[in-house]
Amino acid sequence: MATAFSLKNRLLLFQAEYRDAVIGVTFFCALPLAALIPIAMKQDNPVVATQRVMGTVEYVRLMPINPKMAAGRGLYYTYDVRLDGSNAVTSIDDEVGMPHLVGSVIPIERQHHKRGGDTYRFLNR
């Protein structure tokens, strides 16, 4: 009959003996799963409808706040725009070369996606 102490020692010996094998098998099984992550993250969410709406610029921020963190992206403006009719506020990114003044009324495009979300972008001028 095994005592609790001897069972504990056997488990510790088992753990020490097969630790490398368990890590190797776990890593081997994780590699195919890691290859599937980009496929799983790619969402099929196309734009199914667009609508032209008007909005009023309420606030403008130059992004990124820390230009050192903008590796390869560059600077751009983020606008807080109050939508006419619904009175909701949304954020829209745009290039630095085409600024919009605070208080100006601008046309924007509401893009409704297949999975129910809405995104907004400035219409081309």
Image (spheres, grey):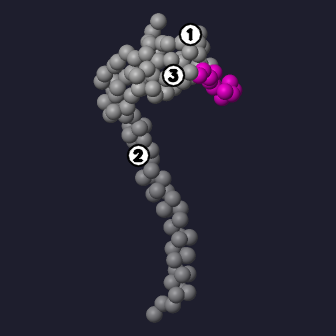
Q: Is residue 83 visible?
A: yes
The residue that label 3 is drawn on is: 81
State how far apart marks 1 and 3 are (Cα). Answer: 16 Å
Judge by depth and name the residue closer to the eye, 21 or 7: 7
Of badges 2 and 1, the one in the foreground is 1
State how far apart marks 2 and 1 are (Cα). Answer: 45 Å
- Residue under the point 46% across and 15% down: 122
**Residue type of the residue flagged with mark 2:** Pro
Query: Which picture quadrant has residue 25?
Result: bottom left
- Percent x, y of residue 55: 47, 18
Query: How busy is the neighbourhood of tag 2: few (under 14 within 10 Å), some, or many (20 plus)?
Result: few
The residue that label 1 is drawn on is: 98
Query: How busy is the neighbourhood of tag 3: few (under 14 within 10 Å), some, or many (20 plus)?
Result: many
Residue 83 position (above or below residue 116):
above
- Residue under the point 45% across and 93% down: 1
- Contact (Cβ within 8 Å) of mark 1 with mark 3: no
Report helix, strand or loop for mark 3: strand
Residue 37 position (above or below residue 89):
below
Q: Which residues are the magenta region?
A: 59-70
The residue that label 2 is drawn on is: 32
Q: Earlier in the sequence, mark 2 or mark 3?
A: 2
- Percent x, y of residue 69: 66, 29
